[in-house]
Image: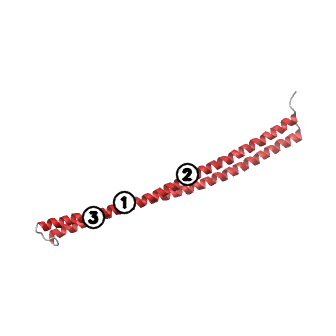
Amino acid sequence: MGADPVTLGIIAVSLTAAAGATQAYGQYREGQALNSQAKYQAKVAENNALSAQYAAKDARDRGAIEARQQELRTRQVMASQRAGAASRGVLVDDGSALEQVVDTAGIGELDALLIRSNAEREAIGFENQGAEFRGEAGLRRAGGKDAVTGAVLGSASTLINTGASVSGKWYNYRTQGP
């Protein structure tokens, strides 16, 4: 005894509809998963940007401390030069003794400026890195939204195509019989 052709036709149409709905739901869920992943990656990029901001502040703070330490070392050297000259009976505010102290002050100031400049360059590098991370976060969020939009459109297209296929099968079944 064979299967009822009407039942087989209804089953075929139903299976086509179910397969299309399952595929559409899968596309939608994939888009949601991609969006969740993109949000996570955006948050990681935002955290990296914040870390870069802290690193920039730290670089500037370290530069200021190191420059101040250099200035103190320079003053100590200058004081030592003046004391040495005075102990030898040399006039410390005149002639070569004064030139030596002035040269030391100039070199010490250049060293302090170089330390500050290097720290500022390092800080700017971190700030640029932070800006890149913020840009990446924006791109990730946009990509997640695009994934959802693509999934919704893909799901809708699948449902429309499935509807057309079910319609065609049902029409053929109704007009041509089992």
Say if 14 sits above or below 40 in the image. Answer: above
Say if 65 sits above or below 9 in the image. Answer: below
Question: At which x and y percent is residue 17?
Answer: 78, 43
Measure how far apart labels 3 and 2 are at the Cα level: 46 Å
The numbered mark at residue 95 is none
User: Seen in the image, is 105 located left or right of residue 151?
Assistant: left
Measure how far apart labels 1 and 3 are at the Cα level: 15 Å
Q: Inspect this view and state whether residue 120 appears.
A: no
User: Seen in the image, is 139 located left or right of residue 156?
Assistant: left
Q: Please name whichever residue, 164 or 86, is drawn nearer the observer in this view of the structure.
A: 86
Measure how far apart labels 2 and 1 are at the Cα level: 31 Å
Q: Nearer the viewer, mark 3 or mark 2?
A: 3
Quadrant occupied by the N terminus: top right
The numbered mark at residue 41 is 2
Q: Quadrant of residue 3?
A: top right
> Of the residues under marks 1 and 3, which one precedes in the sequence?
1
- For mark 1, give the secondary structure: helix
The amino acid beneath tag 2 is Gln
- For mark 2, give the secondary structure: helix
Q: Give the labeled residue for mark 1.
A: 62
Mark 2, Cα crowd under 10 Å, few <14 / some 14-19 / many 20+, is: some
